[in-house]
């Protein structure tokens, strides 16, 4: 591991050892199974030699209840009477709430103001009268500071989400279930790391029973607090923290978890948000499972190294499925990018009638177009953006074809205007506009057939289409004509029964003003 020599040793005797953690997991088992039954271990599919631990099927749809319950089960009578305090952006809070209700104590739970309402309501539902939810600050760190201050002032026990031996031991019980499943031994395990509690507990148990196993810690590209801590020799605070994978969004790793992961994790890798989205898509396609982003991070690590792993038996933990519904649109858009099956190209073509149709003709039959962004702006050239789904080798062939035809293009995947679908459009350049909203069969060529048959006399000045996975496609298209008569003829033709479209609706002038 990087930074081994830098790890301070002067205070090491004050910290529990790996053997202490193993013993704590051994003792945690009988407490944890008072609360809930083991979760399944499933093979991803019949062809891949990777298994997934289904913590999404636990009482709170995440593994965090294990550590919270184990730690709170150790409270003495006085501590239980006084109640506990915790800080969490979601899953740990639910675990503490569940344990508080089960054990007959009370919990004051600090959550950031930005916590989705769904997670706030889940905590209240699980804890009932046993919990008091307090919103503090805009981040987990803000809520954590407030929770620590309140804990010290009120004399209540603080239940740490990861940097506590009993919490780590509780999380480690999921590895006991892996061993007891009989599916082992495993050659490699990909474990997501936020604060490091689950990775340390699970790695400790797996290494005892599978001595040859390789433990790979998986962090988000802008969440690598454990790598930073090990490199520095002690936890350090990240300057920036990406929160898409909110379950692993930790600015500073724990002191105890850093020491444990330094000894137990063989190497660390990072994955991008797009790669996590690709793993979520894979889980949906193979298991009809939709995890939260952090829940798919371990599998994303395996996907990233799939070719190198080969036939080795691999393990990944689906650590949770408490995803805010609003994140699904981001996941869908970025999954193809993460799996290298989606790219966005920006083309440069003459700004004249028929140029866009000619561009589509050059590669229409060889690729699957899933997005179109184009708007008329001043200048000699138009720069439409087309999103394409294809196999990686198809992109190579496509680019060679475009180069041979002399079509100017660039890879615009990740560009801000493409990411946020900013379609520039100058209405002052249009003489006789007609904007229509159309619905067409979602099959190769349907939209192109319409454009070729009905729009020869027009210039396409606006094009907004995004594949939604439905059997029909919908697009908003703007045309410009040389005369009012040509525009009237177009309106007549597109409303005829013979059109390939299922529906054609002309956009109202009021709506058109908002588009401009």
Image (cartoon, rainbow, N blue to C red):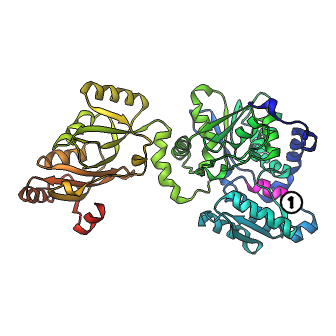
Q: Quadrant of the N terminus?
A: top right
Is-magenta flag for residue 21?
A: no
What span is in magenta?
64-73
Name of the residue lying farthest toward the bottom: 129
Q: Within 10 Å of the Cα at label 1, are there few (<14), some (14-19), or many (20+) other Cα atoms?
A: some
Is 6 displayed left or right of 372 in the figure?
Answer: right
Please say if 61 is above or below 262: below
Which residue is at a point 64% across and 45% down the rendered structure image? 223
Is 387 displayed left or right of 434 in the figure?
Answer: right
Is 312 displayed left or right of 8 in the figure?
Answer: left
Percent of width and height locating residue 94? 71, 62
Q: What element carries label 1?
A: helix
Residue at the disc numbered 1:
73
Instruction: Report the magenta stretch's main SS.
Output: helix
In this orientation, which residue lies closer to the viewer: 248 or 9?
9
Is 331 displayed left or right of 382 in the figure?
Answer: right
Q: Quadrant of the C terminus?
A: bottom left
Percent of width and height locating residue 487? 11, 57
Percent of width and height locating residue 250? 69, 50
């Amino acid at each position: 591991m990087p930074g081994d020599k830098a790890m301070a040793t002067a205070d090491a005797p004050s910290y529990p050892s790996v053997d202490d953690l193993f013993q704590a997991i051994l003792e945690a088992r009988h407490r944890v199974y008072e609360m809930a039954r083991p979760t399944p271990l499933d093979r991803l599919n019949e062809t891949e030699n990777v298994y997934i631990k289904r913590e999404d099927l636990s009482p709170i749809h995440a593994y965090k209840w294990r550590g919270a319950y184990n730690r709170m089960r150790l409270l003495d009578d006085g501590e239980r009477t006084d109640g506990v305090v915790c800080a969490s952006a979601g899953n740990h809070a639910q675990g503490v709430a569940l344990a508080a209700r089960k054990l007959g104590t009370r919990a004051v739970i600090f959550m950031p103001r930005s916590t989705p309402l769904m997670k706030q309501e889940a905590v209240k539902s699980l804890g009932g009268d046993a919990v008091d939810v307090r919103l503090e600050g805009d981040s987990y760190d803000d809520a954590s500071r407030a929770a620590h201050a309140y804990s010290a002032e009120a004399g209540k026990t603080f239940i740490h989400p990861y940097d506590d031996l009993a919490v780590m031991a509780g999380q480690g019980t999921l590895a006991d279930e892996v061993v007891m499943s009989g599916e082992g031994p495993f050659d490699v395990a990909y474990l997501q790391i936020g604060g490091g509690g689950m990775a340390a507990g699970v790695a400790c148990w797996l290494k005892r029973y599978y001595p040859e196993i390789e433990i790979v810690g998986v962090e988000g590209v802008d969440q690598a607090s454990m790598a930073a801590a090990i490199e520095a020799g002690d936890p350090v605070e990240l300057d920036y923290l990406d929160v898409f994978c909110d379950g692993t969004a930790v600015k500073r790793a724990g002191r105890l978890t850093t020491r444990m992961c330094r000894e137990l994790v063989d190497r660390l890798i990072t994955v991008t948000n797009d790669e996590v989205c690709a793993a979520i898509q894979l889980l949906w396609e193979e298991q009809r499972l939709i995890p939260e982003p952090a829940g798919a991070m371990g599998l994303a690590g395996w996907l990233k190294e799939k070719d190198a792993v080969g036939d080795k038996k691999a393990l990944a933990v689906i650590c949770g499925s408490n995803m805010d519904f609003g994140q699904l649109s981001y996941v869908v858009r970025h999954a193809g990018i993460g799996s290298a099956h989606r790219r966005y190209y920006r083309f440069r073509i003459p700004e004249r009638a028929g140029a866009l149709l000619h561009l589509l003709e050059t590669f229409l039959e060889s690729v699957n177009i899933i997005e179109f962004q184009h708007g008329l702006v001043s200048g000699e050239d138009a720069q439409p953006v087309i999103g394409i789904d294809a196999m990686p080798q198809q992109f190579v062939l496509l680019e060679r074809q475009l180069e041979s035809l002399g079509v100017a293009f660039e890879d615009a995947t990740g560009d801000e205007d493409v990411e946020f679908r900013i379609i520039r459009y100058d209405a002052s350049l249009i003489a006789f506009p007609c904007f229509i909203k159309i619905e067409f069969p979602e099959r190769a060529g349907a939209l192109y057939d319409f454009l070729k048959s009905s729009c020869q006399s027009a210039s396409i000045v606006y094009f907004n289409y995004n594949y939604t996975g439905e059997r029909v496609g919908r697009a908003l298209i703007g045309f410009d004509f040389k005369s009012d008569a040509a525009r009237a003829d177009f309106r007549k033709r597109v409303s005829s029964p013979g059109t390939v479209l299922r529906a054609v609706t002309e956009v109202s002038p009021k709506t058109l003003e908002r588009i401009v």
